[in-house]
Image (cartoon, rainbow, N blue to C red):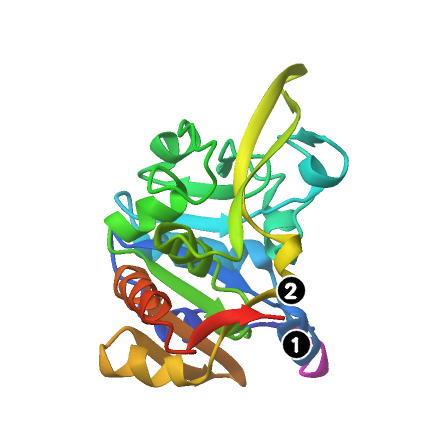
Amino acid sequence: MKNNFNYNKVIKKLSIKKSDKIIINSNFLNIMIMAKKKNLNFSYDKFIDGICSILGKKGTLLIPSYSWEFINKKKFFYETSKSISGSLANKLLNRQDFKRTMNPIYSFLVKGHDQKKLCSMKHDDSFSMNSPFGYLISNNGKNIFIDIDYKDSFTFVHLAEQHAGVKYRYKKKFKGIFYKNKTKKNLAVTVYARKLSTRVKGTKIDKRFDNILLKNNALKKIKVQGINCQIIDVKIAYRLMLKSIRLKDKIIYPIY
């Protein structure tokens, strides 16, 4: 008979408090492999339910459910379009207590106090302050990274790039059909995309940014049950990224 994975031991180390607003980026592959080797049962639902129980009635949880279908196929199915942001979002798509935000490219699955507010946002500009990203900055949100390095998946960097007006990106409009509840409508959203003429391949967050975050009490690193986790103060990190980009100090910079 299998024992259950010790969810509480991990969750308690994540610095989650009652009424927090948090976003979780995750890679559960190594966790699943580890659980199998130790003959343990692992459940996404139990892990998420444990987090939600700490957040309480006034807390809010966001899980990235980004999808490129609207870009590649010119259509997006609100209820069923799969996420490219990891297995957790796809597991939660079928849960009735989670609702999806309305941006067909940078959507989130949301549960908690501000679910209605976030899911009714008309954030056609994906990286504006009137978006879930802006909401987390304004509400002192935390970004928790589970077994994944924030430097590879901290989407807030594009918000900072947009607000700094970097020359290697621009607001690109994508048009397509948005399907929801068996109805459809034409929709247009903007993304701060790479300028192909500049031959930029992406944005790099240098490892030196770790020390900047640590000095400003905006980063916490932990390891529990062999799982590496990072907790970032979104508001402080955003301010520091914006400063770095404007200074052109080569800590946050385009990759060619």
- Closer to viewer: mark 2 or mark 1: 2
Find numbered disc 2 in the image and state the secondary structure of the residue it sits on.
Answer: loop
**Does residue 120 sit above or below 64 in this rendering?**
above
Find numbered disc 1 in the image and state the secondary structure of the residue it sits on.
Answer: helix
State whether residue 2 appears in this view. Answer: no
Residue lying furthest right in this view? 73
Image quadrant where one finds the C terminus = bottom right
The type of residue carrying mark 2 is: Lys
Give the number of the disc on residue 200: none
Q: Range of the magenta residues?
A: 36-40
Depth order, front residue of 47/248: 248
- What is the x, y in percent for residue 41? 64, 68
- What is the x, y in percent for residue 240? 29, 68
State whether residue 164 appears in this view. Answer: yes
Residue at coordinates 54% horizontally, 85% vertically from top-left?
A: 226
The type of residue carrying mark 1 is: Asn
Residue 16 falls left or right of residue 206: left
Image quadrant where one finds the N terminus = bottom right
Residue at coordinates 23% horizontally, 77% vertically from top-left?
A: 217
Depth order, front residue of 239/57: 239
Q: Residues within 10 Å of mark 1 (few under 14, many from 20)?
A: few
Residue behind mark 2: 201
**Does residue 50 sit above or below 240 in this rendering?**
above
Residue 173 falls left or right of residue 216: right
- Can you tell which quarter of the image residue 9 is in? bottom left
Q: Which of marks 2 and 1 is nearer the N terminus?
A: 1
- What is the x, y in percent for residue 27? 60, 67
Depth order, front residue of 97/22: 22
Residue behind mark 1: 30
User: Disc 2 to disc 1, how far (Cα)?
Assistant: 28 Å
